[in-house]
Each structure stands twice: as C-alpha cells, then as structure tokens.
Amino acid sequence: MRETIRIGEKLIGSSETVYVIAEMACAHDGDVDKAKGLINAAVSAKADAIQLQFFSRKDLMTPSHEAYNLLGTLEFSRQEWKEIYQYARRKGIQIFACAYDVPSAELAIQLGVDGIKLNSSDLSNPDLLEIVARSGLPYTMGTGASTVEEIAEAVKTCLRNGGDQIILMHGVQNFPTAIEHAQINRIRMLKALFPFPVGYQDHTDASHPFSRVVDLLAIGAGACVIEKHITLDRSETGTDYQAALEPMELKEFVQTIKRAERAMGSNRILPLSQNEKNYRKFQKKSIVSGCEIKKGQLVTRGMLQFMRSEPGLSPHQVGKIVGRATKRNIRQFENILPEDLE
C-alpha cells in the first residue's frame, strides 16, 4: 500500500503539496489548436498536470448509444493525440491521460504519460483495470456513482496485477453538481477505508462563486489532488463547459489552492516558529512574586501570581517553588526561578 506516490519530481500524499490537474476533457471540441490552447492555459496557471481524454469511439460504445454521433465530432486520431502530447511535453507540464478503453490505455502507455485516469464507469472493467495496473504508472481511480464494494473490488483487481500506485478520486458525476450534492465528507470516508491518497474531481457549476470554495473544503477534508475542468470560453457552451474554468479563472484558482495549502501547514510535529516564539514571549504567563519575599523565607502558594512578565517558569511548574526557601530578597512582580531557591 502506498500513502505517498511519486510523479516525476512531485510527491502526492497527505503530507505533500496539493497536486492540481487541469482537466481538458472534450473542451477542445475536436480542434487540435484548441487543445493546444488549453495546454497553454494550464501551463500559464501553473497547474501541476494537464489531463487529456483518450477514447476510441468504436471501442467505447455501440453505434446506438445517444453520444455516438457527438463523439464522432470530438475524437482525435492517434497521430493527432501524439501531436498534442508532444506539444504538452515541450511546454514542460506533466501529463495525465483519461483512458476510456483498452486501445486508449495502450496509446497512453506507449506515449509515456506521467499518469492515467480510470473513470468511475470502469471500476468494474477488469480488462482496463488490469492493463493500467500492469503499466507501472501512477493512476487516479474515480469513485463517483460507485458503491464501496465496487471500489474495494476494483482496488483488489489492481493490486493483484501489481498496480499499487492508486489515488482514489471522489467526485459526483452530475454536470454541473449542485453544491448540496457535493458530498465532500466522502473524502474522509475514503481515507478511513483505504490506505491510498485521496483526491477530489470538482464538477460544480464553474460560474458559481462557491465552486472556488468547495475545493478548499476538499483540501480540508484531506484531498491531496484536485482535478478541475478547463475551457477557453465558457460562454460558448461547447462540450464539457459547465464545470470548467476559463484561463484567468484557472490561474486565480491555482493561486487560491496554493494559499490554502500554505494555510493548512504541516501535519507533522515541528519546532516552534519564530512567530510562535515571539508570541510566547509577549503573551505567555510566568510565575512571579505577588509580594516582597525576604531571603530565607519559605515560599507559599499565596505569595505567587501567574502574570505576563519576562520569560520564566510556566505556571504549571509552581510545584517546583512552593515550600522552598529563597536565597535572596525577591521584589514584588519579579520572576522566581529555581536558582533563586534553596
């Protein structure tokens, strides 16, 4: 089991920086130049990865399916995908590929992507699970509209085939997802049930201000990967636009995610920062004399007060002082230290 996964120079896990995937989906509308423009937007926004969506229509659905004709207008050839992939490589951004069928997974592996996305619709597809697991690549596994039993069985299949670099992804599959249906706490549930990193696929309405906040809730719930759809112009209402951010919105979104990540801080026990040390010096209380105490007197609890003063003994250490005789005269409001006592 892997609680931390390496993708190139980047680590994914609960103690690592949030990994942001810009999801192109079919927002390219079957236009290679538009796909390159979406890559440019992801690079400009400083997203960690661009996600391409590979599918072979004839291997994905029957001709009678309602989306069959639409996908015919969106499908790229293998050569076109190779051109888009190489363009992304030249731009220096990491590349994930969502593979909807076995030929598409084979293409992604052949090209040398950094990671693969398994759509939640394929949790019960052993052919696709096995080829992705055997690839040795990290992969995200969508869990939307799936039972815990289906997720567990998919995980078992992948592990049997050597694929332990799993990132489970929560995401409700409505486009757009109503805020009240986002079910962010499912991230906590997945983290409790499975020993893998967990991420969030956001499908909330990108035109709604809360769509920028819900991802911060996901980070607070433990998501270490955020997948956000992108489009060049949402007003065109093309393909996969409902949950997609425009280029400038994506840039602001990534900046917000990085600020949230810094605000979350580390879950490791760290030494006190200089700011915390400054606060302690100014605010923390020390044991001081509430009255003048003569040399040789036994100190009683009634002689002592807990007050802001110069750094000294903490109030919880008062037992080290009471009942001991002083070595010197102590003025009112002076700190009392162990070296002042017999």
Image (tube, helix red, strand yellow):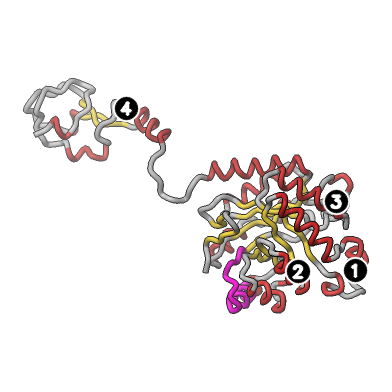
- Residue occupied by mark 3: 33
The nearer-to-camera label among 1 and 3 is 3
Question: SS class of the residue under badge 4?
Answer: strand
Q: Is residue 265 within the magenta segment?
A: no
Q: How many marks?
A: 4
Q: Which range is magenta?
A: 151-167
Camera-side residue: 31 or 334? Answer: 31
The numbered disc on residue 308 is: 4
> Disc 3 vs disc 2: Cβ atoms closer than 8 Å?
no
x and y, in percent, of residue 88 in the image: 74, 53
* Residue at 23%, 22% in the rendered image: 333
Q: Which residue is mark 2?
A: 107
Residue at the spot of label 1 = 68
Do the residues bearing badges 4 and 1 touch, measured as CB atoms within 8 Å? no
| Amino acid residing under circle 4 | Arg
Q: Amino acid at mark 1?
A: Tyr
Examine the image and state in which quarter residue 98 appears. Answer: bottom right
Q: Which of the labelled discs sits on residue 167, or is there none?
A: none
CA gap, disc 3 to disc 2? 20 Å
Relative to residue 290, is residue 179 depicted above or below? Answer: below
Q: Residues within 10 Å of mark 1 (few under 14, many from 20)?
A: some
Q: Is residue 177 visible?
A: no
Are discs 1 and 3 less than 8 Å apart at CB? Answer: no
Reply above or below: 203 against 111: above
The quadrant of the picture occupied by the C terminus is top left
Q: Is residue 291 left or right of residue 8?
A: left
Instruction: Give the residue displayed 89% in from the left and 66% down from the top.
Output: 67
